[in-house]
Image: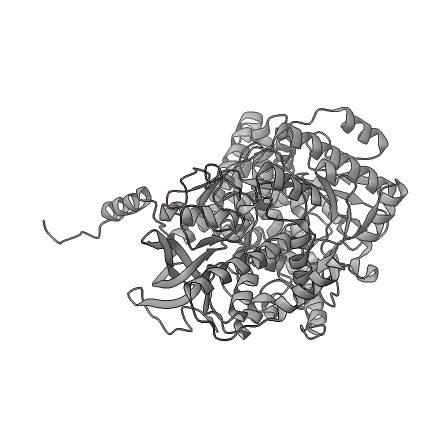
Amino acid sequence: MLHTWKSLGLRGKTRAVELEADVVIVGSGAGGAPLASELAGEGYSVVVLEEGGYFPTESFGFDCRRAVVEMYRDGGMTFALGMPVVLCPTGRTIGGTTTINQGTALRMPRGVLQEWRTGYGLSEITYEELSLYYGAVEEFIYVSKPDPEVAGLNAAKFIAGARAMGLEAEYLPRNAKDCEGYGVCCFGCPTGAKQSTNISYIPEALRKGADVYADCRVDRVLVEEGRAAGVTGRFVEHDTRASGPRITVHAEVVVLSCGTVGTPLVLKRSGIADSSGQVGRNFRLHPVTQVVPIFDELVEPHRGVSQSAWVHEFLDQGISLETTVLPPDMLTMTVPHAAREHAEVMSQYPNSGLVGVMIKDSTTGRVMPRPGGGASLYYQVGREDLRRMKLGNLVASEISFAAGAKRVITMISGHHELRGPGDVARLRAAKVKARQYFAMSGWHPMGTCRMGSDPEWSVVGHTLETWDVPDLFISDASVFPTALGVNPQLTIMALSMRCAGFIDERLRERGVPARGRDDELERMLFAERAASSR
Amino acid sequence: MSEYQPKSYPWRAWRRLAALARGRSVPLRGNRRALRKRVLARSLVPLAPALVGHPAQAFDLEPRVVADAASEMIVAGPAEAFLAVLGSVHVLNFLSVITTGRRLRSLGEPDQARVISRASTSRVMLLRGASMLAGLPLKVAYYNHDDVCCGLGFTRSALREDAGRHQVTRDR
């Protein structure tokens, strides 16, 4: 069942809730929800605690500003200090960031896993094994490429422009079923087409008997005799976020899936699992800037699939170009002009497109607890990443001109309006410094509790169990040793499914009785294994 | 030692400081958030038309409506965001005093726009950042308004109605 402070009938701060479960999972996003569904299916009693509130599909109503304030952490204003300051939006709602992401569902590039295997000693994870989990997740969340009719004119123009330049461009696989292309995936899908975990895995977990508690902030992990024994936290008021009654869950196994920013904070507050000194370090991002091509003809940038087409030819260089559609109140953030010039560009909104330039970063930052609660993020975009960002902006601008754009708006000061090949050549010749970027956003935070083969420099092993505290697992993007270079939700889910197997094994060893096992996935995995061996 | 704990402001401030030092979360009281919102809105109202760019073809909104919506968005975030936006307004004011001899809020809209444009194209990052930061919440609030959205082809009510007819279930 889904519970909140109010549904439990609690009043005031004095009442406390004590629960017992086989597994307690903190977070209901891509890392926590599949795990909850799997373990509940195995017959274990599972409790999921989510800091954010529950928002049903009917409440998602095209008001992006309100959605950002209600469903994003820090009202959408989580930022990493550095030059430039990088805005790092993450979700805080049932479904975590999957509720407010673009829905792109890509597998991890083989080269990245190879880097993990050789550089971080993760030889136990093979691409063949991961493929089985990828397959199971893709089937469950309806991963497919969008219908070109629905994808929108922005994507069609981008693909035409890229092909005119001889580049390979195609539609992106997404976790959406019967998507009608309303273009507001980042603010909650208004039709329930996007299969975020609040639509897919969480209802499945509830159906299998898991208990989900919304508006419930976990403060620390309880440790007894050196092992994780539960978590404790407080309910928070849905609107004001004021603290309410305490909740404590005692469990055989604890899983932290609070995301790259949240998980290290809980570990730091608990004072555990940091013998390596790596908790909160190795903070990775995908730095993103946008270019806005403006055409003579109508593009309707709010119609179409949020993120629908991409050019992946530069993936080996760590650059990916993805089209995006946004409503006017969000597109305004990507136009760096001021005063009347800004208004003039915005008046061209119906004729505008949007292309995002995403970089696989090569530097690392840090996440630290901030006095008074919350996190302080530090991240400096590296010189090599700046070079690639400029290259990405150049290619995106050239594609836009090849698609027929009359001018292209970039986020680079001094080059913020390109009117033709001459301006592109000027940008190519220029040296673009970090301070020249008007703004940069950082999507897909990763790596603050990295996985590795050695407790000296990693926080968790390949099973995602922490080296220091037995029975404490971490299942989110914080375990990634490096950035992926592509949108990570599918990989987080696949690793989460893999982790479910290790937790099941642990509970079986303990003799924890399960209510009745659901062997559907096991049968499917077996069938796929048999098929691949043939 | 006496059990008596005075409820005076210094005592509350001391407890807050002690909690902060222990790394505890001290949520803002409702009235403090409202105070921040009021302070920010008051600073943004006179600059709203110039910072948004006041497009003639779009619906002419009341600056207070835009500034209130922008302030509401900012105070929902961390204190740093509030301070950054307020600081940006002061930086723009400082630039205005240096270049025109008057504070930005006391200038007419065309002169305000001139100062803001100068800041946004400056080689000094602080000035560019200030014009961007001060303007961003106002622009988001302005283009979020139903009448402005409609003028740009994003008709929220029609889209909502249409989406209501296309609800998707997970059934295969």
* Residue A261 visible in the shown view: yes
Judging from the image, the colouring scheme is one colour
Q: Is residue B129 magenta?
A: no
Image coords of residue A76 (percent x, y): 55, 50
In the rendered view, does A5 fall on the left or right side of A394? left
In which quadrant of the rendered view does residue A56 lie? bottom right
Q: Residue at x 48, y 74 (%)?
A: A1
Residue B148, placed above or below residue A295: below
Q: Nearer the viewer, residue A393 or A166?
A: A166
Q: Residue at x 84, y 52 (%)?
A: A156
Image coords of residue A282 (percent x, y): 53, 38
In the rendered view, does A280 fall on the left or right side of A58? left
Image coords of residue A517 (percent x, y): 54, 72
Q: Residue at x 65, y 63 (%)?
A: A189
Residue A495, placed above or below residue A384: below
Q: Nearer the viewer, residue B15 or A358?
A: A358
Magenta residues, as a range? Answer: A370-374
**Quadrant (top left/top right/bottom left/bottom right) for the C terminus of chain A:** bottom right
Image coords of residue B4 (percent x, y): 14, 53
